[in-house]
Amino acid sequence: MSKNLTSSSVLTKKFQITLPKKIREILGVKSGERIGFIVEGNEVKIVPLKSKLEENFGKVKAVSKPEKFKEIREFVEEEIAKNVIEELA
C-alpha cells in the first residue's frame, strides 16, 4: 500500500471529518454505511465495515415457505370480530 497523501480533510469543532469523494470511491462506501478505524502507531487506517446482514444475505435456506400474511391477517380479524360479537351478546 502506498503511503502517499491522496486527500485531506478539516477536523470540525465536533471532531468530525468529511471523507473525500476520492477516498469514498476507493473504499466503495456510501452515506450511512459503517467504517472502522485501525490505529497503528501514529497512523490511522480507515476500513469499510460490512454489515453482518449483507455479508450473510442468502447463505441461509428457508426452513419453510414464507408466511401468507394476508391469510393470517384475515383470520385474526375474523377471530377478533367473533370475540367482539360474543362480548356484545
Image (cartoon, rainbow, N blue to C red):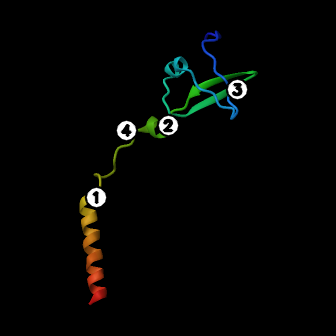
The amino acid beneath tag 1 is Phe
Q: How far apart are marks 1 and 3 (CA)?
A: 48 Å
Labelled disc at residue 39:
3
Q: Are marks 3 and 2 in contact (CB under 8 Å)?
A: no
Please, what secondary structure does the residue beneath circle 3 have? Answer: strand
Q: Name the residue under label 2.
A: 51
Seen at 30% across and 52% down, the residue is 64
Looking at the picture, does residue 87 appear above or below residue 40? Answer: below
Q: How far apart are marks 2 and 1 (CA)?
A: 28 Å
Please, what secondary structure does the residue beneath circle 4 have? Answer: loop
The amino acid beneath tag 3 is Val
Is 89 on the left-hand or right-hand side of 44? left
Labelled disc at residue 69:
1
Give the quarter of the image for residue 41: top right
- Nearer the observer: mark 3 or 4; the answer is 3
Q: How far apart are marks 1 and 4 (CA)?
A: 22 Å
Spot occupied by residue 35 in the image (x, y as percentages of width and height): 57, 31
Spot occupied by residue 11 in the image (x, y as percentages of width and height): 68, 26
The tag earlier along the polypeptide, 1 or 3, is: 3
- Nearer the observer: mark 2 or 4; the answer is 2
The tag earlier along the polypeptide, 2 or 4, is: 2
Furthest-right residue in this view: 41
Looking at the picture, does residue 62 appear above or below residue 74? Answer: above
The tag earlier along the polypeptide, 3 or 4, is: 3
Q: How far apart are marks 3 and 4 (CA)?
A: 33 Å
- In the rendered image, which quarter contains the C terminus? bottom left
Q: Name the residue under label 4.
A: 58
